Every structure is written in structure tokens, then in C-alpha cells.
Image: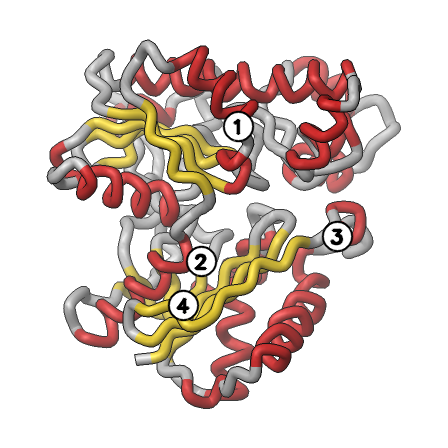
Amino acid sequence: MRIFAINPGSTSTKIALFEDDQKLFQKNVDHDANELKKFKEIADQLPFRMETILAEVEAAGIDLSQVDAWAARGGGLVGLVSGVYAINDIMLRDARACVTRHPNTLGVQIALELQKRYGGEMFCVNPPDVDELDDVERVTGFHEVFRQSKGHPLNQKENCIRYAASQGKKYEDMNLICCHIGGGVSVAAHRKGQLCCCNDALNGDGPMAPTRAGWVPATDVIRMSFSGQFTEKELIDRVMKHGGLVDHLGTADAREIVERINKGDKYAKLVYDAFIRQLAKAVGGCAAVLEGRVDAIIFTGGIAHDKYLVDELSRYVGWIAPISVQAGEFEMEALAAGAIRALKGEESVRQYTGVPVFQGFDYLKG
């Protein structure tokens, strides 16, 4: 079985071709954050991302007509249970609406374009909208606003499964904290196989990221909203696409930032150190959720390749539990594996309904 995996990220487009569980080809194309700013809407990036994919495939001499299934990361969906989903019209409708204003919403749209050209089946595997939060995690200081689960469940769960296997155990038997540190950042507590606590990595909750603002004092944002200097879209984009490291330093590339630090850039060091401390505070919060019973802390994502970050973050949180550095990500492998399970009938394919798993707490109010 040949599976083509598609994973559009904040600042990259990742593609890979698998034959069963063997990876035949992978390409991670980095996009300059300033180049992406030229597109007014996320949907406007679709032709650009398609052109990128087809150019890389052609250069590699790959025949896409031999592909059995397209497996996309997806995004922009309502909260749903984990699993493998058929890409249907309702899913495409929600993805095109770009509710989250994140390029991962292009994943299922790219799969559709490729399927139209070459045939095959289409799947979405564990999109960022997987919602396994404890109900107590949802409550905020506004009765009409609830915290959402918007992280990196595809890579988070795959890394936790792999770590558990390395210890001769099952994911469902361990308490783990996983830090996905890439273009986006999510820090999550996994309690016995349930992703029970995670920051909303898209909507401004949690540590700042290379392209996202993260925690910002709410009243200051309100004042900015009424200052007349920004439109609603401009502020949302600043929170979700142009905030964080790129807002401070003009780049989302951690490698460039570390190089600047090594050359004596004191402001770059201050901002990067703040980024690391915010990650550490999020890990500490997850440890509290797990009541201190943490089997391991996993660092994953592209920025986990940076020794300075790993050393500094370990200094902050290493006393909590053993640390496993699993730099990079296994999202492409997880996408292919999900599609293969679906094609073989080893896992039932779910149908996306557009109805969220969480619909409020009105049923609790007397």
C-alpha cells in the first residue's frame, strides 16, 4: 500500500511517501515567515502549497498515480474523538472556513486536490482538534468562554507511544508530559492514554511560540483592540501567525536566533530565554495536573534539536521526572500508519459530523 502524507505547518510544508511502513521519500520545505505574510487569507496559500508539493514530487521522480491513499493532518474542525477520519464534505466545509486561521486547515484541501487528479482514498488522522480534556480544564474566568484543546495530538501521542514502547510499557499505563516545540508549541499532560490537559496552541493560550503570541495580559490586548491602530483581523493574525519570536526578532527560525545569541545579541537572548521559561512553567502546570506522578517528560518538535534550549529547559524541569529528547517529529509516520490501519480494516474509519464532543455545561446548571 502506498500512502502519501501531507502536513502543512505554520512555516513549513511536509510531505512523505510510504510503502506500507517503509518511508520511500520525505521532504520538509521551510517557508519564510515574511513570504507567508503576503497571503491575505490562509485559503490563499492553497495554490502556493500545491505548487510546492508538485514541484518536489516531480523533482524526486515520483508517480502519484500509484498512491492508494492520501493522509492529511487537517485542522480547523470542531472538537472530536481521536482516530482516523474519512475526509468528507462537512470536514472540508469546516476546514475552508479557516476558523483557526492556521495552515493545517489546508491539509484536507490539498488531499482533495490530489485525489481529484490521481484517485485513491482520503483520510485525516488525529487532527489538532482531538479533544480529550478533563472538563475542569475547560473552565475560564468568563462563563461564556471555554478553553479548547488545540495542540499537536498527532505528534504528541506518537511520541508518547514510542517512549512507552522503549520502556517496555504501554502508553495507556503511563503518566507523561510531552512538549511539542516547533513552529507551534503545545505542552500536554497524558494520563494513562488520555490527553487530559493541553494549552490551546492556536488561540493565544500557553507559552509563546516562533509565530504565536501565547500568554499576553488580556487588558493590554483589549486596549490595543480599541486603540484604532489595528483591525480585528490584524490582531488575530498577530496572535496566531505573526506573534512570539517573529514579532520580537523578525524571524521564526530558532537556528538563526541561537546564532545571533552566540554573536552577542543580548535582546535575542532575553526573548529566547523568556520562551524557554514559559515552556518550563507550562510543564510545571502539567506536573500539578498529574499530581506529581510523572513517569517522564518528552521534548519533541524541530526546536528540540537545539542543545541550548534542551539544557536550559532541563535545568528548570529535570527535577520533576526523567527527560527524553525525541527531537523532530513522527507526524508523517503517524499519518501513514493511521491510513494503513484504515485500509486494512484494523481500525474503523470515523465520519466527521461537525458536532463537537463538548457542548457546554448547561446540563449541570440547576
80 horizontally vs 97: left or right: left
- Earlier residue among tags 1 and 2: 2
Quick one: SS at disc 4? strand
Q: Amino acid at mark 1?
A: Lys
Of badges 4 and 1, nearer the viewer stands 1
- Circle 2 sits on which residue? 73
Please, which colouring scheme is shown? secondary structure
- Earlier residue among tags 2 and 3: 3
- Earlier residue among tags 4 and 1: 4
Q: Residue furthest right?
A: 229
Q: CA distance from mark 1 to mark 2?
A: 28 Å
The residue positioned 49% from the left and 72% from the top of the image is 111
Of badges 1 and 3, nearer the viewer stands 1
Quick one: SS at disc 1? helix
Label 2 Cα neighbours within 10 Å, binned few <14 / some 14-19 / many ≥20: many
Image quarter of the C terminus: top left
Front in this rendered view, residue 5 or 59: 59
What count of labels does the image hold?
Answer: 4
Q: CA distance from mark 2 to mark 4?
A: 7 Å
Q: Does any portion of residue 238 appear in the rendered image?
A: yes
Q: Are marks 2 and 4 in contact (CB under 8 Å)?
A: no
Q: Are marks 2 and 3 in contact (CB under 8 Å)?
A: no
- Earlier residue among tags 1 and 3: 3
Q: CA distance from mark 1 to mark 3?
A: 28 Å
Image coordinates of residue 141 in percent, x first then y, are 47, 15
- Circle 3 sits on which residue? 36
Q: Amino acid at mark 3?
A: Leu
Quick one: SS at disc 2? loop
- Earlier residue among tags 3 and 4: 3
Q: Amino acid at mark 4?
A: Ala
